[in-house]
Amino acid sequence: MSSEVILSVSGMTCGACSASITEAVSKIDGVSQVSVSLITEEAKVNYDESKVSAGQLIEGIEDCGFDAKLLPNHIQKKGILKNTAPETLVTTFNIEGMTCGACSASITEGVQALDGVLECSISLLTSSGSVKHVSSLLAESIKNTIEDCGFDASIESSRITSKSTHQYVTLISVGGMTCGACSSSITEAVQAMDGVSEVSVSLITEEALINHEESVTPDLIKQTIEDCGFDANVKSSNPISNDLNSNNDDDNEDETSLQIFGIKDDTDLVHLQYNIEAALNSLPGIAHFYLAFKNDHSSNGSSSTSVGNLSTPEQPLFTDSNSNGIQAIRLRDNHDYLENENLIDELSVIYDTQALGVRLLVDTLNNIDDDILFLIVNSVDQSLASQLRLLTRIADIKYWKNNLLKCIGFGIPTLILTHTEKMEFWKHTLLFPGFFLVTLIELIITTHVQFNLGSVFIKKFIQFIKLGGKNATMDVLVCISTMISYMFSILAIGLNVWSGNKDGPPTVLFDTSVMLITFISLGKWLENKAKGATSNALSKLLSLTPTNCTIVSNLEEYETFLKSKQINTEKKLPREENNLSSSTMTDLQTRNIGIDLIQTNDVAVVLPGGKIPADGEIVFGESEIDESLITGESLPVFKQQGDHVIGGSINGPDLIHIRVLRSGRKSQLQQIINLVRDSQVHKAPVQRFADYIAARFVPCVLILATITFAFWLFICYIAHVQSNLPLAFQKEPNGKFFVCLKLAISVIVVACPCALGLAAPTAVMVGTGVGAAHGALIKGGDVLEKANNINVILFDKTGTLTTGDMTLVNHKVILLENSKLNCEDWWNLLGSVECNSEHPIGRAITKEARDKLGLSFEEDNFNSIISDFKVLTGLGIRASIQLSNRSAEHKVFIGNDRMINEMFSHLKPVLQKYLNDELDQSVNTLAHVIIDGEYSGFYEFTDCLKPNAKQLIDYLTSQQNYIVGIVTGDNKGAAIKIGHELGINEGNVFSEISPVNKDKVIVDIKRRFGGAAYNETGDNSVCNVGVAFVGDGINDAPALAQADIGMAISSGTDIAIESADIVLIGQSQKSEVGDLYGVPIALGISHATFQRIKINFIWAAVYNLIMLPFAMGCFLPFNVMLPPIAAGASMAMSSVSVVISSLLLKNWKPPKGGLGDKFMGKRSRTGRIYNGVKRNFNFFKKNERKLHLRNESADFELLPNQSPEASP
C-alpha cells in the first residue's frame, strides 16, 4: 500500500545536504519518490507501507547526520477502526510554572497559533488548560508547544467529540503565569485570532477559557499560548449548544482510554488485535473503538521493540485520535515521535453508559489473555493528586522556601562584606593590582545567586527576548534589575583591574542583586502560600472525591438477602434491627474496586466514617450523613432507606448500602468542582481592564526607568546645578552616576503588575469557594459584578416558592348522557395519561386516580394502551388511550385555561354553562379535561409555600430593598393567592405566562424600567435595572438566560445548568431554611466579593501610583529616596497584601438562624432604579402604567398582571 509522509529535517545548510538525504532515502527498499526542500526544511517521501515504515525513513535521514521527525499533521496512523471516528478532540493539560496573568496569556497565544486548534482556555489558579483541536493535531504537539514557552506540562485526558456546526468552548491549563501582564498577553494574542469570539484567562486557576468557531482548532490556540512563552495543556473542548435546556450530561456516551501492559517481543499482535475486536463486538453499547500498538504489525515490516514486562508507569498518558485511528504518543518530549521506547500501547473505547458499564468493559478485556493487562489511563486517583498538588501549590511553595533560605544564607555574608569592604583589613588582601579578596568572595556568592537561585527569572527573560520583546512579566523586571546590578559590578571590577588601583576594592552593587532576589523569593513564597489558601474550598471538594469503594459482587444474591431480612421500601425495621451482623457481612460477597470502575446500579457498602462513593439511594440501613462541604448543611442529616445521598459526603456511625445512580463526571460533587473551577475563567469587566493595563505595564515601567536614569544624568552632568543637587547625590561616596543607576533600578523593581493581576482572581476564587461551601455556585467574576447591580428579583412559583407537591382539593366528572364511559373509565383514562408525567399536577392526578381505582401496589398498572403521547408546552398534555375493556380509542387532553382558549374555543359556552358559578372565584390551580372533543371535567389543586419563603421575601423587600415579583404559568387567581401570602403586590404577579414566554416579561421590564430603556426622546440609554430570575433551571431556561442573573435551584441531579449564572444547591429539605436560603447567600457573597475586588484594585493602583514617584526620585528634594533593596521588599509585599486582602473574604458568614439583619450589610436604597423610573415616568403614564415606590417598603408595581404578548 502506497503512502506519503512529510518529515521535518533540521541541520541542512546547503544543497549538498539535501542531495545527500535524497540519495540515502531513495536507496531504501520500498521508497518510490523523495523530494527534499532546503528552504522549508522538509522531506516528502512516497513509500510502500508493506516494505518500509516511517520510523525507518527517519533512521535513514538521521544516519546522514541530520535530525528528522514527522510533522504532527502528517504522522501515519495505525490501529483499527469501527464505524466513523469523531473529527475533534478535547484534551486537558496540567501546567506547572505559571506565576501571573502574563504567563497564561502567552500560553494562550502560543496554543492558538497552532494549526488545528479550535479552542483554548488557561487557568492560572488551577494550573490547567483545555484545548479543543482537530484529531490530526496531536495532543503531544500541544504539550510540546506549552513546554516551549518555558512551562512544564502533562496530558491529563483526551476525549473525542463529534463535529458540530456550533461554536466551541475550550479550557486550557497554563503554566508559568506570574502576574496580570502574563494573562493579558495571552488574552490579546488569542483574541487576535480569526474565529475567536471570547477569551478569559485566569491567573489564579492558571486556566484559559476560549469561545471560538470550529475552524479555530484547540491546537492552534494552544500553540498561540506557547508562543507567548507559557506551558499549556488542553483540558476540554466542547460545542456550545444553542439549546437552553441542554447540558453536558444529556449525552449518554462516554469514553474510556486504557493502557495495555504485558506485550512482549513474541506477542502475536494480529491475534491480540483480533481478540480485542471480538471482545468489544460482543459487548452492547459500543459506539467506536480505536487501538494503537506501540509495536507495528510484523506484516508491515516495521521494527518490533519490546514493551517490557508487565509494569505500570506512574502516570500513563492519553493517545490522540482522528478519523483514521489513533497514534500512540511519547512519554517524553526529547525524542522523535516514532521512537518505540517512548510510545505506549493503548485502546480507546466510546460506549453508551446506559447499555454498558465501565467495569464490565475492563473485566471483559482483561479476560482476553492472562499475560495482558488493561488499566484505565489517568485514573481518578492520579488526576486528583495532580490537581491537588497544583491547587495547593505544594511544589511552588517548597521551591520558593528553599530558594529563600539559600538566598538568606548567601545574602547575609554579602551584606556584611559590602558594609566592611572599606576596612583596612580588606585593603591589604590584594590578590593582584585592582582585584581584592573581598571582591572575589562577593563575585562568587553573587554569581551563584544570580545564575543559579535566580535562574527562573533568567529563563523568563530569555523567553521575552525570543518572542521579540513581547509578553513581558514581573520576572522580566526582576531579571533586568538584578542583571543591571550584576553587570555594573563586573564593569566596575574590570575598570579597577584595568587601572591597577591598589587603594581599595571598587564600588559594586552585588548586595543589591543578592538582596533583590532574596526579597523576591520571600514574596513568591508568601504569595504562593496565600494563593494556595484562596483555593482551599476547591481543594477540600477535590479531597472529598473517593478513590476506591466496596461493592456487592452478586446483585441477585443481594436482592435475595434483602428479602430474607424483610428490608424493602414498604417496610422499615427498627434501627436496632436494621443492621448487618458480622456473620452476615462474612456471607455477603463483596469486591474492592477503584472508583473509576463503579457503574450505575451497583450496590456499594459504606462503612461507618467512610466516604460515599457516588450519588445514590440508600437500600439498606440508616445513618447520619455529613454533607457540610457540599451543601453547606452544618449539621449531619439523618438518612434512611429510600433517601438520596451525595457522593463524597461522609457516612456517620452506622453501616449503609447504597444503589449507585450517578458517578464520575456526572456526579453532583464533580459538577460542583467543575463549576467552582470554571468560575475562574469568566472574568468581570473590571478584571479585563486590569489585565489590559497589566499587559502594558512592564514596557511602561522600563520606559520610566530609562527616563529616570536619563533625567538625573542630565541634571548631574549637563545642567550644571551641582550646588543645588539633592543631598543624596552630594553624600554618595561612589559618585553621582551610582545614585542615578540605583534610582533606575528602584523604578524597575518597585513596579508590581502582580498586584493588579491578582486583585480580582484571588477574590473570585475565595468568594466562589465561600459561596460553594454555603450551597451557592457562582459561575464567574462577571456574574459577581452583575449580581452587585441587581434591583429586581423575579421568582418562578411552582417548585421554587412553593413545594410543588400539589394537593387535589376539588374535582368534577362531566360525562354526557350518550357517553359510553363511566366514572371508573374516566379515572383510568386520566391516570393512564399522567402516570409517566414528572409535572406536579400530573403526579397529583396519578395519585388520586390510583386511590380511586384501588391500585395500592407499585406493580399495579392502569388497564390501558397509550399512544400518540405529546406534551403541549405551556398548555398541557395529550394522548390516545385504548382501555382494555373497550375497543374504542379515546383522545384525551388535560391542560389549563390557555389550552381551552387556543385549542377548544368552541367549548367556552359549554364551560360557562357547567362551571360558571364554581370557577369564577377560584384561587386554586385548574386543570381541564377534554375527552374525544367534549368537555369532561376539571381538577382544582392547591400548593403550599416552602418553609421560610415568606421570611425570605420579607427579608429581600424590607431589609435589602429589592423589588420582588412572581412569574408563573398558573391561573390568575392561584398566582395572586400565593402573592398575597408572601406579601407581594398584585401588580408584581405575572400569571398565565408560558415557560417559553417568561423571558419576554424580563425583556419588557428592562425596556420599561430602564434596562435598555428609552428616554423621553426615544434614544437608548444606560441600563438602570438589574433583573434576577430564580427558577428550577429546566422549564425556566429561557428566563434564566434572559435575566441579568439567572439563579437555578438544583434538584441535585443536575448541577451544571447551562442557562443559569448561579446554581443553588438545595440544602436538606429537613433543614430549617431550605434551598431558598441560597438566594440571599448568593447575593450577599457576590456583593462582598465585588467590594473586595474593588478594594484590591484600589490598593494595587495606589501602591504603584505612590511608590513609582518615590523610586523615580520625585521626593529627593525633600531628602527622601527609595533604595533598590527597599523597593524590592515593597514590591514583594504588595502582591502578598492583595492576596491576604482576598483571604479576608473567608470571614464572611451567613446568618446562623434564619434570615436576619446580620446576614448582609444594609443595602443602600436603590437609587439607580429610582432615577430610571423618574426619567421614564411620562412614558409609563401615557401607557397607563402604574408605578409606586414607597419609603417604608419595596412594594413596586412592575407591570399590569397580564401576559407580555398581550401588552401593547
Image (tube, grey):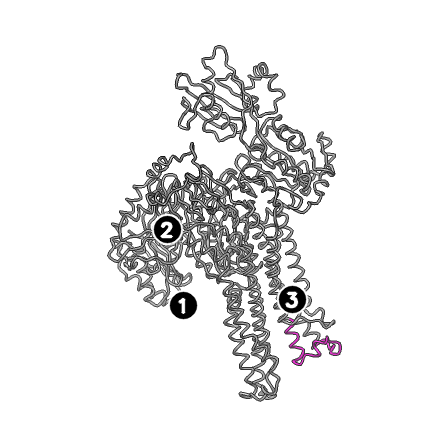
Which mark, residue 376?
A: 2
Q: Which residue is located at x 73 percent, y 78 percent?
A: 722
- Name the residue that disc number 3 marks: 704
Quarter of the rendering containing residue 317? bottom left
Which mark, residue 176?
A: none
Q: Between residues 356 and 1118, which one lies in front from this camera angle? A: 356
Outermost residue, top direction?
818
Residue 251 seen by the camera: no
**Can you say whether 453 is above or below 619 in the image?**
below
Is residue 1112 shown left or right of residue 212?
A: right
Badge 2 crowding class, 10 Å Cα cut-off, few under 14, some 14 to 19, many 20 or more, is many
- Name the residue that disc number 1 marks: 13
**Count of numbered circles in the view:** 3
Q: Earlier in the sequence, mark 1 or mark 2?
A: 1
Percent position of residue 206, x then y: 52, 56
Task: Give the dominant element type of the magenta stretch: helix, strand or loop.
Answer: helix
Percent position of residue 570, x then y: 42, 32
Q: Between residues 672 and 784, which one lies in front from this camera angle? A: 672
Q: CA distance from mark 3 to mark 2?
A: 55 Å
Three-letter amino acid code at the position of disc 3: Leu
Percent position of residue 141, x then y: 42, 57
